[in-house]
Amino acid sequence: MQADEPFGLDQGYQPLPIRPLDSILNYCPNYDALVASRKLEIATQVEQLQVQMRAPISRLRAMFNLTVEQGNAETMGQLYETVYADQNLGRALPKDYNSTDDTNLQFIYNQYNALLFDGSFAQIISTPLLRTIRTKLEASIKGKLLKFSLMVGHHSNLLPLAVLLNLTSAECIEQQWKGQTVTSLNCVSSPQFAANLAIELH
């Protein structure tokens, strides 16, 4: 793709990632309804997060010319994705945007996603993927598959899987952000660009 903006490769070319997703990794037909249901389940926790982060959210909202209605954790998470992409593309950010803003925005993003992709919702989303992984491992044990199998996903696949495997949680993410002792064995953030989860069979 050739872009008109001053970023990307020479002569304005910008590479586009291609993700050939297996049908088993596609969102289920009820995904939107499941998300809506999960948002209702975590409404109180999200409200607590927004109260806790009221000052940073207000600052970010003013800095990025967002409306009062957009001053919520979900929108801040979407803003983080945009800022993260802009940083990697070398685009200019507001001159007042600093490392503290970046830390706060990333915490809101990580915390909101950890709350969203948890509970029965995480189990529903991850079950088809876990079944596929188990089938591939069992086939490999029997010598019916190559030694390496690659499945391409998204943070909406990887994060609920990480939660279910006890690799992260909303609690440990908050402990990290507050500089407290993390009580869990693992505590990864919401998957970043090119993140991966490797499973080895021994």
Image: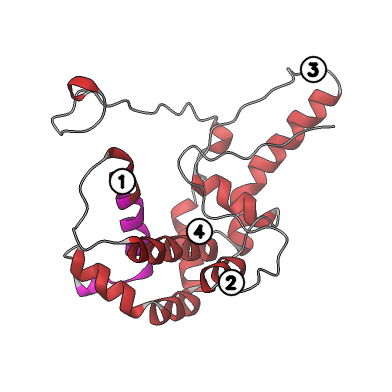
Residue of label 3: 144
The residue depicted at 39 percent of the width and 67 percent of the height is: 104
Q: What mark, if any, has residue 34 been given in the picture?
A: 4
Task: Identify which amino acid the numbered label 2 is placed on.
Answer: Gln
Task: Identify which amino acid the numbered label 1 is placed on.
Answer: Gln
- Ranked by sequence position, the earlier of labels 4 and 2 is 4
The residue depicted at 70 percent of the width and 57 percent of the height is: 166
* Range covered by the magenta-colored residues: 68-83
Residue of label 1: 87
Q: Residues within 10 Å of mark 1 (few under 14, many from 20)?
A: few
98 with respect to 146 (left or right): left
How is the model colour-coded? secondary structure
Identify whether 193 is placed above or below 117: above
The residue depicted at 31 percent of the width and 57 percent of the height is: 79
Residue 194 visible: yes
Q: Quadrant of the N terminus?
A: top left
Residue 163 in the image: state x and y as whole percent: 64, 57
- Ranked by sequence position, the earlier of labels 3 and 1 is 1
Kind of element beneath mark 4 = helix
